Image (cartoon, coloured by chain):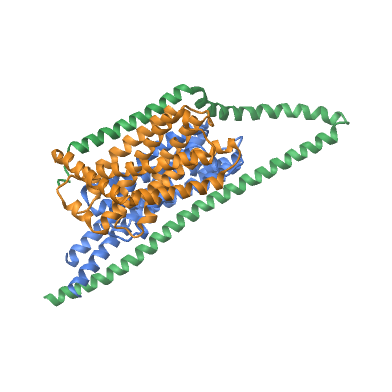
Amino acid sequence: MNHKDLESQSNASTKIPILWIILGALGMFLAHYLVFIYAPMETTMRAAQRIFYFHLPSAWLCYIGFIMCAGWSLRYLMTQNPKHDALALASAEVGLTFGVIVLTTGPLWARAAWGVWWKWEPRLTTMAILFLIFTCYWVIRSFGGDNAGVRRFGAVLAVLGAPNIFFVHVAVTRWRGDHPNNIGLEPEMRVVLYSCLLIFIILFSLLVRLRYRVHTEERTVSALSRRLSRIGG
Amino acid sequence: MSAQFWPCFKAILKKDLKIELRSKETLATVSLFGVVLTFLFAFGFMGDPATNLAVAPGVLWAALLFTGSLSVGRTFAREQENSAFTALALSPAPRSAILAAKVLVNIAVMLGVMLVITPLLAILMHIDLSTNLFALMSLITLSTVGFALVATPLAVMAVGARFPEVLLPMVVFPLVTPVMICGVRGSAALLGTSADLDYLAWTQMILAFDMMIGGGAFFLFDWMVSE
Amino acid sequence: MNRHPLNIIKLLSLLFIVLGLCLGGLTVSVAQAQDGSESVKPEAKLEAKPEAKPEAKPEAKPEAKPAQVDIRPNPKRAANKNFDSEKEERLENLRYKHLWIAYSLVWIIIFVFIRQTWQRSQAVSSRLEELKSRLIALEEKDK
């Protein structure tokens, strides 16, 4: 690899997506307008119900991030392509970020709506377990060092963890089940919810791309520095 | 490749069982740990008979998880001590045969440990297990199988990691949550403390989990072990 | 990929995964069929709630009016009403407080994540530049 190869490679994979950043920022402002001004007040939960517009999209995206992580991990295991691993790590990290949002807004909403911070019910529990599994993944990946063994360990954990969620959900559903399943949403509320979801998808893909960029660059740096130290430059 | 499966599987299984039966190292230490754990749990949760009946399943499955993670962690650590695992991985033996043999050995050791813990718990907490013994045994066996299927492949990978003894439980416990829930609820149904469902449904679910996770483990195992 | 071909064991494993998922799914559907009424309940409860509120409000008003005419139960009712409105006010405050906390937390979390990503990317790109210049210097020397 000479320096021109390096340049072309880093330019191709790691351009900063300016358009997406602008789109994401505008979208977030729009989302706040929709949530706080456009959305009608719900009758029973009143103001607390507005938490829901950010809570639900982030829960969905958290799941999507973890499923993406499992998918890329499986591909990484099969192909040993470090790019797939970087994508898996990036989507897990972004998924975890949305997971933190879900797990902080959830109890705040629950306290206002049900009077308790935590309830043992399927979605909450499933979310918590999933979050735990991928926190382990993240901890292993960030504190385990950066070698092939750790990457493979993480990949296996992700691949085994994602379908596991199906069972956790089933088990907890049968254990105890009580969650707002289909809240009768008014049309305006639906509009707000789906536009928030769209905006969060933009934000999600933006964050994954930024994160992926960091990981690939870090890998290039470590490969390059190893090479240079071998040459003795 | 698959033609070599049975001979390799039998050879590894025989070797591991022989080592285990001669030294009794893992079985003895982990059983002792289980006994200590059971006493501690009994001290912690002992109450009136109704309370005992209610907490016993949780105690039993918690003990299964703790002793299981200890014994599974030992299986590959022993191979690692004299670099035998490198030789095993380099040999032409199919990887799935290695995994299958190791899983079976782990199941055997864990069942041995549970054979010590379960009666002890029943005695210490004054619980009568004899009425539904067979159902309880099948529940415990299936849970053990599930645990071994999840933990064994991960234990292979934890061997070279930095903190294998912390890493393994940390990773395995969240993954076996379905086993924990189903096992505890199922045995609670057996003991009559929870009326939500019959134990058969829970047993069936652990079986489904075992099949799914076992399939996943065997599917992935070729890629897990490095040369 | 070619080193670990799709052999009979892998195919069997895939079969087992599918079977396990089917069995798990079957268990759920059987359970749902068994207690179908239970799984419907939460929805019914939630739909009932918004309906119950508007109904309760008009009923409360006519009750309050005769109470004003009648003197005897007035202090008690007024106190009760005061208590209720106080409770409702406190709940309303709590709701707004939690709303603000939730949204500010969302922003803090996203901000921290972006900042951390940014810092790492800055550190990495400066390191990359440094390494690149060293590589160029080495290439020059080779020539």
Identify by letter the chain in orange.
Answer: B
Q: Nearer the viewer, residue A86 or A53?
A: A86
Q: Could you say which quadrant of the image residue B117 lies in?
A: top left
Chain C: what color? green
Count of numbered circles in the view = 0
A67 vs A220, left or right, is right
Query: Residue C31: percent from the left, percent from the top?
Result: 44, 25
Above or below, comparing residue C34 to residue B74 in the picture: above
User: Percent position (x, y) of residue A180?
Assistant: 52, 34
**Residue furthest toward the bottom?**
C141
Residue B77, image x and y in percent? 30, 55
Q: Position of residue A140 (x, y in %)?
A: 36, 55
Please name the residue shown 25% across and 70% down the image.
C131
* Residue B214 seen: yes
Chain A rendered in what hue? blue
Q: Quadrant of residue A194?
A: top left
**The N terminus of chain A lies in quadrant:** bottom left
Image quadrant holding the C terminus of chain A, namely bottom left
Camera-side residue of B209 and B140? B140
Q: Residue furthest front?
A: B22
Q: Residue furthest right?
A: C72
Residue at x-position 29% and y-position 32%: C18
> Closest to the observer: B22 or A57?
B22
Vertical arrangement, residue B204 with respect to residue A79, above or below: above
Residue under the image location 51 percent in, 28 percent down: B196
The answer to whether any part of residue A20 appears in the image is no
